[in-house]
Image (tube, rainbow, N blue to C red):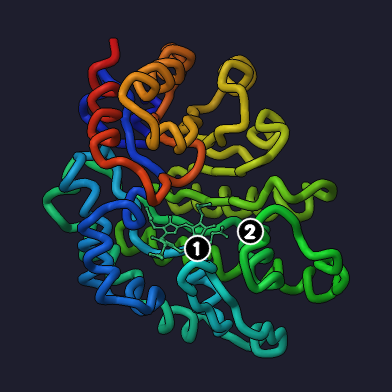
Amino acid sequence: MNPIKKCIVNKDTKSNPIWLMRQAGRYLPEFKEIRKNNQDFIKLCLNEDLSSEITLQPIKRFGFDAAIIFSDILMVPYGLGQEVVFEKNFGPKLGVLDLIKLENINEEDFNKNLKSIYNLISITSKNEILKNKDLIGFVGAPWTILVYMINKMSPKKNLSDNFFSDEVLINNLINIIEKFLKIHIKNQVNAGANIIQIFDSWAGLVKENLDKYIYNPTLNLVEYTRELGVPVICFPRGIKDYKNYCEIVKPDMVNIDYDVDPKKIVKEIKIPVQGGMDPKILLTDKNKLKKETEKYLEIFKDHPYVFNLGHGILPETKINLVTELIHIVRNYK
Ligand code: 1CP
């Protein structure tokens, strides 16, 4: 089987499949219109009809080869009972972390808190527009979720000095997180997601003990997901050694970030690759976009490659450049 086909079901494999991380929400006028009237982001994620509509907006507008569900990696801490709010111009703010409460939460409570997400997937997966396209479910990797739950906000570039001070808390928490991420994956697959992407957005902050924080817990999720019969894409943003990561974690496909050299990746990595281009290119002009897009297509011309970015699409992205990007990818020979 063509490994691209295995990861992104696309009839027309003459051109590389394309979808963009964070393609639902953020930059689309039709999303901004909905968002204006829905200030509470968590409530919006739990509104099945609206979140289904937002999931499909980029498919309707651009015809990407895959849809990613409109939700957030922080819905898992929310499902576990930790308060999560998204503040304008600040980002996520998480509430008090109560380990005793977390140790007592059961699968039923968690499922009840997040049932709208599973309904959203179920409704969306039946939509005609996704015939022959994939519906990607996702989770944050255990490490990235741990970072938000302990740090209680975005770490930006550094973790606080005392981040690792409570080892008992960290060890217990990472196990609880892993257990519920598996449940969240299973529920998304049962509802109709046919690929799972694991976002380890803060992998680059781990300088030692990568086994404990990155490799082992992610490998557990990858193996679990594969047993459910669904391929897994991993995005270990900022990791230094992608080759080592792929050999240990063994995802079906790896999404590279924009800091890595794609020429090195194509030589070192045997599995299908996704992404890489700097999302800032979509803020420039058609000429720069063509040059940079074709650079990635050329480098990966003999490698199974799904076109995507090296991080999420930026809110200031120019819509016409997204249309142009798809045109370039689909017409590349
Ligand atoms: O395509 C999509 O947008 C699909 C839905 C999606 C996904 C896949 C959203 C909606 N969030 C995510 C993943 C996500 N969320 C990640 C992993 C990918 C990445 O690194 O970009 C992370 C780290 C988050 C956490 C998060 N959610 C932040 C903090 C980022 C940081 O710097 O720490 C923020 C600001 C959000 C809010 C959010 N999530 C999604 C949207 C559309 C938004 C913006 C909400 C708004 O309108 O204000």
Q: Residue at x 25, y 76 (%)?
A: 37
CB at disc 2 and ligand 1 closer than 8 Å: yes
Q: Quadrant of residue 240?
A: top right
Q: Residues within 10 Å of mark 1 (few under 14, many from 20)?
A: some
Q: Amino acid at mark 2?
A: Thr
Residue sitting at x 48%, y 73%: 86
Disc 2 on helix, strand or loop?
helix
Position of residue 289 measured from the top left corner of the image (x, y, whole percent): 37, 24
Image location (x, y in percent) of residue 292: 43, 21
Question: On the picture, is 113 further left or further right than 181?
Answer: left
- Whether 6 is drawn above or below 297: the answer is below
Could you say where residue 208 lies in the image, as x and y percent from the top left? 84, 48
Specify the amino acid type for callout 1: Ile
Dot 1: what SS? loop
State the separation of the CA atoms marked 2 and 1. Answer: 9 Å
Ligand 1 within 8 Å of disc 1? The answer is yes
Up/down of 191 relative to 40, above or below: above
Between discs 2 and 1, the one toward the N terminus: 1
Q: Is residue 11 above or below residue 96?
A: above
Q: Quadrant of the N terminus?
A: top left
Q: Which residue is mark 2?
A: 144
Q: Nearer the viewer, residue 286 or 190?
A: 286
- Residue 243: name its quadrant: top right
The residue singled out by tag 1 in the image is: 73
Return the residue nearer the eye: 79 or 184: 79
Q: Is residue 190 visible?
A: yes
Label pair 2/1, CB-CB below 8 angstroms: yes
